[in-house]
Image (tube, grey):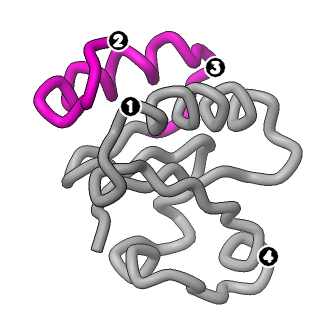
Amino acid sequence: MSNRFLFIKHGCRACLEYERAIYRINMFLPLNKKIIVRDNFEFEKFGIKSHITQERFSKDDFDSYPFLYFDGYIYKGGTLSQFCETFVKTLLKEDLIIEL
């Protein structure tokens, strides 16, 4: 099971930037190392935890989006997809199939 998730909120412009950055990075990762992008709508609106990773967090933990959970590291909020790319590329250095 992956320990790499990007939780996004529907309608969040920053989330869209991060989602695009993650999809670009995922192209260079093996299948078992990819970052899974999940819309957190059900959890935000109804408290329904649709994925086991959400069990680790409460609603209060999702106080800002995007919410990146990456092998035990958490990065919340922000508007720069470049920061997200740098953050992830640094942590993924050894997992990348081709250097970016």
- Whether tag 2 and tag 4 are in contact, CB under 8 A, the answer is no
The Cα–Cα distance between marks 3 and 2, rounded to whole angstroms, is 21 Å
C-alpha gap between disc 1 and disc 3 = 23 Å
The span from disc 1 to disc 4 (Cα, nearest Å) is 34 Å
Task: Name the residue tied to disc 2.
Answer: 100
Q: Position of residue 25 (x, y in %)?
A: 45, 29
- Position of residue 10 measured from the top left corner of the image (x, y, whole percent): 83, 52
Please state which amino acid type lies under the numbered disc 2: Leu
User: Which corner quadrant of the image does residue 66 belong to?
Assistant: top right
State the residue position of label 3: 79
Which residue is farthest left? 94
In the rendering, which numbered label is found on residue 5? none
Name the image quarter holding residue 43.
bottom right
Helix, strand or loop at label 2? It is: loop
Q: Kindly check if marks 1 and 3 are in contact, taking CB atoms under 8 A apart as contact.
A: no
Q: Compute the Cα span from label 2 to label 1.
A: 8 Å
Which callout, 4 or 3, points at the residue further toward the start of the chain?
Answer: 4
**Percent coordinates x, y for residue 95 in the rendering:** 18, 36
